[in-house]
Image (tube, helix red, strand yellow):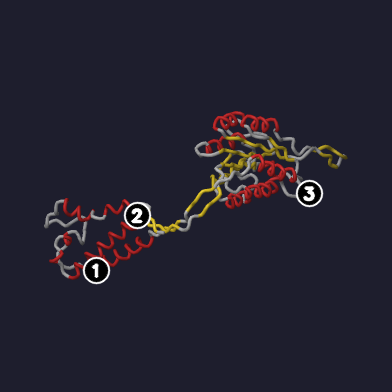
Amino acid sequence: MFHFDWPWILFATPLPWLLRRLLPAAPQSISSALFIPFASAITNRQQLKPLHTVKLWMAILCWLLLLLAATRPQWLGEPLELPESGRNLLLAIDVSGSMEQVGFDSSNRNRLDIVKEVATDFIKRREGDRIALILFGSQAYLQTPFTFDRDTVAKLLQESVIGIAGRETAMGDAIGLAVKKSHTLEGEQRMILLTDGANSAGAVSPVKAAELAAQSGLRIHTIGVGGQPRAVRGLLGMRMVNPAQDLDEETLQMIAQQTGGHYFRADDRQALESIYRELDQIEPITEGSVVVHPVDELYPWPLGSALLLSMLLIGLPRSGRSA
């Protein structure tokens, strides 16, 4: 059905006539600064020549078309019911230099590639949530604002690369940015922070950031990524290697506890997949929906018609007395 977004603009229809009636006429000896081809003709229609009459009606029609375009005519489609949970879910992914380590699963891919695959599956399951994405390294920045478009969030996550935000880890800044972006929104506020290191950069400490998150009602679930210590063969024989030696589990546990969330440790891909499935259970998608109408904007049609008509009006020859 048709809908006018700003129908009150139609009250401006008699504005040219009112200006003609209320404003004093310009002296005949002075050229008009503003040329209105139809103003005087409104009250002197009988004296107009045929060309003037055509120009008058063309100008009136042009004015009406401009008003019609200004009302923003729209075509509203059939109502659609979309799922909505009312939850704002923010994913914070570590893209610092340590995420390029390999050995997180049987393949030779780095940690970030595996995290992107598992997190993408999680994003696609969160139907009805508003999802935002923060990437952090030496700095934290908002890659995707809160949106229902899960495909776009997943795509931008897949396009992230190691070191795009620096090589260090600004965990506190990531939490601070999440608090800033979520505190003005209605609904439940949730954050899932994934890292394989310790806070080594940024202006805000994780402890202070967690306090701010708790005050704003932002619940944070933290995930520590890193394999278990294992023996590897070297030139001098067997030696122990700890892939998670930089992981600050104590801080991650503190952040989760202070904000009412949970801390998880992912030793490999299977453990990470299990963690995200458990998060689906901890933060279930609630039943709810919102009704929306697809909208097609129609204002370009009257606006374009007014433009063409005004060009024709300018091209007509000027004859007789001007107003």
What residue sits right under mark 2 in the picture? 71
- Count of marks, rendered view: 3
For badge 2, the amino acid type reads: Thr
Residue at 16% from the left image edge and 57% from the top image edge: 31
**Residue wearing tag 1:** 316
What crowding class fits label 2: few (fewer than 14 Cα within 10 Å), some (14-19), or many (20 or more)? some
- Which class describes the residues within 10 Å of circle 3: few (<14), some (14-19), or many (20+)? few
Q: Residue 127, image x and y in percent?
A: 60, 49
Tag 3 near tag 1, CB within 8 Å:
no
Which of discs 2 and 1 lies nearer the camera? The answer is 2
Closer to the camera in the image, 302 or 8? 8
Give the residue number, with chain letter if any, for mark 3. 106
Amino acid type at circle 3 is: Ser
Q: Is residue 258 above or below residue 77?
A: above
Residue 163 x %, y %: 64, 44
- Separation (CA) of disc 2 from disc 3: 61 Å
Mark in the foreground, 2 or 3: 2
Q: Quadrant of residue 34?
A: bottom left
Q: Does residue 194 appear left or right of residue 5 in this picture?
A: right
Q: Quarter of the image holding residue 196? A: top right
Neighbour tally class for label 1: few under 14, some 14-19, many 20 plus, Cα within 10 Å:
few
Task: State the CA–CA distance, disc 2 to disc 1.
Answer: 29 Å
State whether residue 104 is above or below residue 27. above
Check disc 2 and report its element: helix, strand or loop. Answer: loop
What quarter of the picture does the C terminus occupy?
A: bottom left
The amino acid marked with disc number 1 is: Leu
